[in-house]
Amino acid sequence: MEFLKSIKRGWDFISDKVDTATRWICIFLILVMTSEVIAAVFFRYALDAPIKWGEELARLLMVWAGLLGIGIALKDGDHIGLEALTSRFRGRALAWCNLAAHGFVGLFLVILLFWGIKISRAAWDTFLPALQIKWTWSHLAVPVTAGVQLVHLVSNILGEIVTILGPGNAMSDK
């Protein structure tokens, strides 16, 4: 059991570091996107000289920030869940329910990771028209964020396993 707890602590450390980096990246992306949109509006309406690549850049940054934000929500436990069902459980029963839910999410994320990589590779030869960068940079948001979420999910799964296998939880089962 101590070995499992040490693995959990290691994954929690990794998950915390990934979360911190993700939060800073999101802050940066949102600041750049907001600045770019303000500049684009100013150039379009005040100077009557629209920025041709402004909308593409804003969309690219919004996709990355939005998808990375899903990983932050998962880490914070704010990801969508079925509280109407789980609120009736305690102890190991709740841990088993959460473990099943995490398993389904994990399966989805592995599929998303696989297909995200495949789609990103397929987009290698195409370019965003105004920015003239590869579409792959847009599509890479999917497998990268799936990977970020998998890191957090493994930490959550290990926590549920520790709860299930831990001593003293038999009295709190329902």
Image (tube, helix red, strand yellow):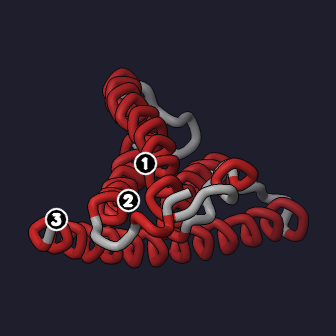
Label 2 residue SS: helix
Q: Is residue 87 visible?
A: yes
According to the image, label 3 marks what residue?
4
| Residue type at tag 3 | Leu
* Residue 61: image location, x then y, percent: 57, 57
Vertical order, 5 against 129 (above or below): below
| Quarter of the image with the C terminus in it | bottom right
Q: Give the Cα separation between the discs numbered 1 and 3.
A: 16 Å
Q: Which comes sooner in the sequence, label 3 or label 2?
A: 3
Horizontally, residue 17 falls left or right of residue 44, namely left
Tell me if I can see residue 125 in this picture. Answer: no
Q: Are marks 3 and 2 in contact (CB under 8 Å)?
A: no
Vertical comparison of 8 with 59: above or below: below
Extreme residue toward the top, this view: 122
Could you say which is closer to the camera, residue 62 or residue 134? 62
State the SS at label 3. helix
Which residue is disc 1 drawn over? 99
Mark 2 crowd level (few <14, some 14–19, many ≥20, 10 Å Cα): many
Q: Position of residue 134 (x, y in %)?
A: 41, 37
In the picture of the structure, the residue carrying the numbered disc 2 is 160
Mark 2 → mark 1, Cα distance in angstroms: 6 Å
- Marks 2 & 1, CB-CB < 8 Å contact: yes
